[in-house]
Amino acid sequence: MLVSKYKPSKRSKNKIALKPKETEDRFRIMADGISFIIWVTDPDGRIKFVNRTYCEFFGITLEEVQEFGWHPLLHPKDSEAYIGDYKKALQERKPFHVEARVRRADGEWRWIDSSAEPFFSQSGEFSGMVGSSPDITERKEMELRIQRLLEKRSKQLQDYQTNFALLVNTMAEGIVVVDNNGCVLFGNPAASAIFNLTQNELAGYHLGIPASLGITEIELPIERQINTIELNSVEVIWHGQQGYLVTLRDITRRKRAEQMVTMLSHRLVESQEKERQEIGHELHDEVGGSLTAVKMALGRAKRKLGHNSDLELKRIEDIVDETMDTVSTLSQNMRPDILSDFGLTEALEWYFERYTRRTGINVHFKQKPAIKRYAGTIETTAYRIIQEALTNVARYAGVKEVTMGVHDDSEKLYIQIEDRGRGFVPQKVGEAPGGISGMQDRAFLVGGELIVDSSPGKGTRISCELPLIGH
């Protein structure tokens, strides 16, 4: 129902005193020059005068207006409210204001904003109402479009909220909204399952740490075990309050699997090194012992056979000496006891000395500061990677020197091997065991990383990082 928008004003107490006919004529001339509707009624509400714009707007004459008045022009839905408010204004001699739809002679419906003031004769007698009615159709249509747009947006928002709720409540991952202190404001069913709480219990639950952007991990005691939960947080505004939308993922199984892989990797490295050590000892004790016995037998034969056999026996003796040296080198390379007994620094220095003597390549060894003892798996991995890298330098680089750098911090051991040799394209190198992929696999098994930077004619740099924490 249309409701009057009139509010009493100070003007309602003023009295408009129309003067004799000449003043009335001037009023008519002025009213005909105004671009919006002007109308005047008698004390009973009957139309006495309308301006030219009125007749042009409705497409009717003054006589037709006076014949049927307002009633046929008003929209049925607005007629009752309009007439009721207007009659009340007449009775109380008060201003009148209402918006209404009216029909023109061509059948088109338009909106007008009708306002009227009572006027009085010079003697103070109530003489009727004088009013104006601007055409507000465009404004009303704009308001209607805005209203429809708002209704459409409101429905879309409701649909979004419904879809969001459906999506969040059916997600396998836990979703919670928390305040800046980590207190839960909202949680989906998956989050309730992760925390082993009902949704009512989850509201107000404290995560144990303040929420922050990015990915973090927390450990939660749930049902007599410790579960690891990964949190991924983004900032949101929740019901006018700043907070965080946090995605929860139970990564307990993954963490246990990672721990199992790490443990198995350590066992694999230890098993390989133990096997190498056993083979090295076998080479040293059995093969080395047999070669020593052969050499001793050659000495006895040399003495018995006399001077004529010296040259031939000397050749055999040289072959035996060379074989014994090779076996000794293989034995030490399989698992140098110095690595287990004295650590990485001494083992590397021992190896570099033998490497230079055997290949003629000088190793410039840099430490900052002097490295210390590490876990057995780390020392073994570092030693094997350096050993393999220097073997590749001797085979392919074509250089007379190589630079070796080793240092550490509280978290990692850093290794760098660099030469200025022939270089190569790393992507074209095969994945044969013991090559680049073999070194990378060794680093990976202990949770480290190895990067090869090389190009033809510009040398090669191998950078390796091995973790010290957790070993």
Image (cartoon, rainbow, N blue to C red):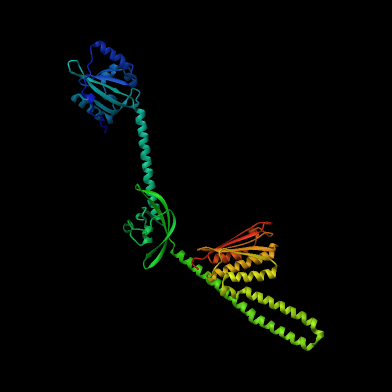
Q: Which sits in the foreground, 81 or 138?
A: 138
In the figure, is residue 280 to the left or right of 115? right
Q: Position of residue 110 (x, y in %)?
A: 33, 27
Closer-to-camera residue (261/310): 310
Q: Is residue 329 visible?
A: yes
Question: Residue 376's image quarter?
Answer: bottom right
At 77% across and 82% down in the image, what residue appears?
313
> On screen, 393 above or below 317?
above
Question: Where 400 sits versus 123, above or below?
Answer: below
Displayed quadrant of residue 193: bottom left
- Residue 432 in sight here: no
Q: Residue furthest right?
A: 308
Considering depth in this image, is 406 or 304 the residue closer to the camera? 406
Residue 130 image position (x, y, % from top left): 25, 20
Q: How many marks?
A: 0
**In terms of depth relative to the viewer, which is nearer, 195 or 114?**
195
What residue is at 72 percent from the left and 83 percent from the top? 295
Left or right, 62 with respect to 94, comes to: right
Q: Is residue 141 left or right of residue 315?
A: left
Residue at the front extreme? 369
Rendering coords of residue 422 (x, y %): 69, 59
Furthest-top residue in view? Answer: 22
Q: Is residue 63 left or right of residue 434?
A: left
Classify the position of the N terminus by image quarter. Answer: top left
Q: Position of residue 15 (x, y in %)?
A: 21, 20
Q: Quadrant of residue 455?
A: bottom right
